[in-house]
Amino acid sequence: MLNKNDIYSLANYGEVVAGSDDEKRISHKIISLMEEIVDEVRVEEIRVMNWKIRDGKISLDGKEAEKCSYVILPYSPSYHEEGLVNKDFMFEEVSTLSQIPFVYERCLKNENCKALFVTLDERLRKFVIKTPPLLQRGPSMPPPKPVVYVKRNFFDMFRRSSRLCLDVDTTFTPYSTGTIIEGILNGQDDHKAFYISAHHDHWFHGFRDNMSSIAALLGVKRGKYERHLLSFTAEESGSPHFSSWSWSYGSHVFTKMRESELERAVLNINLDNIDIGTLETIYTPGLSLLTKSIENSKPGFDPYNDGYSFVKAGIPSIMIESRNNPVYHSEDDVLNEGILSYVTESLPSLINRMLNNAEDVNTLDRDEISNFIKDTYTYINTEMKSYLTNFLRAIESNINVFRGILKMIGTTSSVQENGKVSLFPVLYAIKNSSKEAIDVEDFGRIDKIKDNGYGLAREYLIYLDSIKEKISEIYIDEIYNSLKEFF
């Protein structure tokens, strides 16, 4: 049985980056802990890209800045530049780390911007930088300029300086190895299976995000159906192609590799970034009967969570996380005794209770699913509405049809609405492109509608209508094939 000393040892590994020697060491520890409680352990090694900073130095007016005042953000390139602070460098205060990609794009478009300096608060924090368009899993351009995160209490000192010299020495290893660990608890019935997941790579000490989740994962008990305990690599970073979808790479690869095996999967529960005061449960629409007794639970999707990889594979997910964790991705995410007690006692009990309830085949709320699908009616055409009406009728007799529709969700991102998940995301983006440019998951960017005074807006609308027509045909084919699969 897992004891607190095991968690203490996990919490003391320090930063663990996908593909690093530290990941190898912590993987061996997790494997040994799983072997004590499960019937079988599988280890899958996958290709990941490892980023490492070898050295970084900043000088302000000829004097070296304190190392404790800043951190070079992941995926920054090696770089040497010096210049005037108020002319050659961009300084920006953000209210959330998720704003950094949008600020970085402004830096990239500014020929005078040699590097970007950002701050949020007095804690050092990390966030992977990426090039636009966002949300693309394919190869993206590597970031050409570095980003430096500065503690707020040092930020004004940086900005008041006259001259700045920045030296960054980093290395990328595109053929490193990350580890996916899978522990299997056998059940009495092997026709169905549950997948409970977390990730083990993390920035700084990473206790809340995400060693606490690994601790809770190891408290899952066996039940009627098989239970698979998964510890993923490459949630924070690691995609080999500088992908602007830089997170959840390990879980994405796993769901692709195990596509046929996952046809047995009934449910995923993913644990990430556990902080007691800000804990929430985001569940796939239809799972309210499993989560109704849990405080701060709501239907929806979090695309920045490994559970989203399962949803994209057609598997409903319950995502237990703390999106408003005050020490998220920071140096202060250290061991906390209160959280330690919660993740070794209360949280595993909650997970086991939900899994036991989910063994009842009638746990999906069809009305909730229907409302989720009908939300698309404001941006799809009449023919698609007709097909979806048939889809809703099909769900009444075969709930497995819902798996097909889950595969059609996607994420859009813009300055005003970051990380919006919807059905038929390209059509959603087109409807909203009059407001701002919108990036669409694995599609690219839908630019904001503009008019140059000579009819360009009209021509662009014709272009968007052509995309809408073509994409609607693709979605209709997918809906039809989903129906055909089950009838």
Image (cartoon, rainbow, N blue to C red):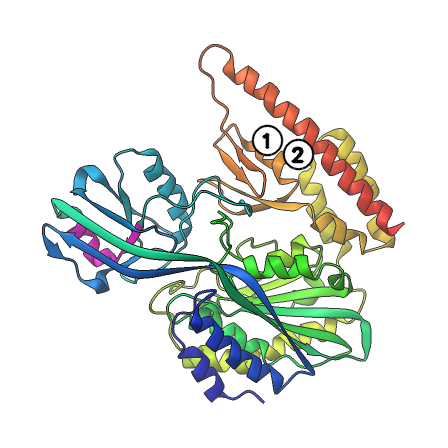
Residue type marked 2: Thr
**Is residue 290 left or right of 27 when viewed as pictured?**
right
First reached walking from the N terminus: tag 2 or tag 1: 2
**Is residue 26 left or right of 126 when viewed as pictured?**
right
Q: Residue 378 carries which label?
A: 2
Q: How far apart are marks 2 and 1 (CA)?
A: 9 Å
| Labelled pair 2, 1 in contact (Cβ < 8 Å) | yes
Along the line of sight, the residue nearer the viewer: 85 or 207? 85
Q: Residue 224 carries which label?
A: none
Residue at 29 percent across and 33 percent down: it is 111
Asked whether residue 405 is drawn in magenta, I would say no
Residue 451 screen position, x and y as percent:
47, 17
Residue 201 visible at all: yes
Q: Is mark 1 on a helix, strand or loop?
A: helix
Is 131 located above or below residue 5 in the figure?
Answer: above
Along the line of sight, the residue nearer the viewer: 140 or 244? 140
**Is residue 434 left or right of 228 when viewed as pictured?**
left
Foreground: disc 2 or disc 1: 1
Instruction: Please give the range of residues in magenta.
Output: 147-158
Give the quadrant of residue 324: bottom left
| In the image, farthest residue toward the top | 454
Residue at 19 percent across and 57 percent down: it is 154
Name the residue carrying label 1: 431
Residue 322 screen position, x and y as percent:
49, 64
Q: Is mark 2 on a helix, strand or loop?
A: helix
Give the quadrant of residue 475: top right
Is 12 located above or below residue 393 in the figure?
Answer: below
Residue at 49 percent across and 52 percent down: it is 246
Residue type marked 1: Lys
* Numbered circles on residues, count: 2
**Disc 1 crowd, CA 10 A, few/some/many (<14, 14-19, 20+):** some
Residue 388 screen position, x and y as percent:
78, 40
